[in-house]
Image (cartoon, grey):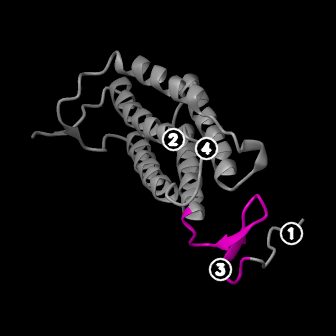
Amino acid sequence: MKIYTRTGDQGETCLYDGSRTTKDDVRLDLIGDLDELSANLALVHSLHSDIQIQDCLLQIIHDLFILNAHLAGAKNFADLELSLQIIELEQSIDAMTIDLVPLMNFIYPIGSQAIAVTHISRTICRKAERKLVRASRDFTFACSAQAYLNRLSDWLFTLARFIAHKSAIVELALIV
């Protein structure tokens, strides 16, 4: 099978369900952001030696692939429900937060490559969440998708702080 089809050369593409849409369709833009997020999470994964964090990241990448299939209209994922994944993210956030100093100020997204890439992933997740809200005006998606992306960005923020803590990196904060 050839990787190129030439069917998108005129600015259109085919979704999983067979429908065609323009490449600037808000759903396709959202799918692209989630793909970008997955690629960034793969980089975060490569920067960690902690098996537990690597396993979480791999599961999240898997969940994002399933969410993308849902957004593209794959029939197998029409009834996508991410409630269990949201609970798992919350439990992981709670576990990581136990050892963290309570947050009193805005923190800068710096300290190490792993911290910076995790924050980049968080911002891509927030961008995807905003696009999902916009796309939801015209399309119906899994009711848990928005909550999942919201919780995932919280998880990524907490992960960046957790990385700093475990690496003994002092978080720089904006005093307000």
Q: Amino acid at mark 4?
A: Leu
- Tell me residue 114's x, y (percent): 43, 40
Q: Nearer the viewer, residue 1 or 112?
A: 1
Q: Which residue occupies the foreground of this view, 104 or 118?
A: 104
Return the residue at label 1. Answer: 2
Label 3 crowding class (10 Å Cα cut-off): few <14, some 14-19, many 20+?
few
Q: Position of residue 130 (x, y in %)?
A: 42, 54
The prevailing secondary structure element of the residues shown in magenta is: loop
Magenta residue check for 69: no
The extreme left residue here reads: 176
* Mark drawn on residue 112: none
Splitting the image into 4 quarters, where does residue 7 fall? bottom right
Residue lying farthest to the right in this orientation: 1
**Disc 4 or 3, which lies upstream in sequence?**
3
Q: CA distance from mark 2 to mark 3?
A: 32 Å
Report the residue at 38% width, 35% height from top: 160
Work out whether mark 2 precedes mark 4 in sequence or the reverse, and give the earlier one: 2
The magenta segment: 8-26
Give the residue type that dot 1 points to.
Answer: Lys
Q: Which mark is residue 44?
A: 2
Counting from the top left corner in percent of width and height, residue 75 is at 77, 48
Q: Are marks 2 and 1 in contact (CB under 8 Å)?
A: no
- Earlier in the chain: of badge 2 and badge 1, it is 1
Label 1 and label 4: CA atoms lie apart by 25 Å
| Marking on residue 11 | 3
For the residue marked with disc 3, what is the amino acid? Gly
Whether residues under marks 2 and 4 lie with C-beta atoms below 8 angstroms apart, the answer is no
SS category of the residue bearing label 4: helix
Q: Which residue is mark 4?
A: 64
Q: Is residue 19 magenta?
A: yes
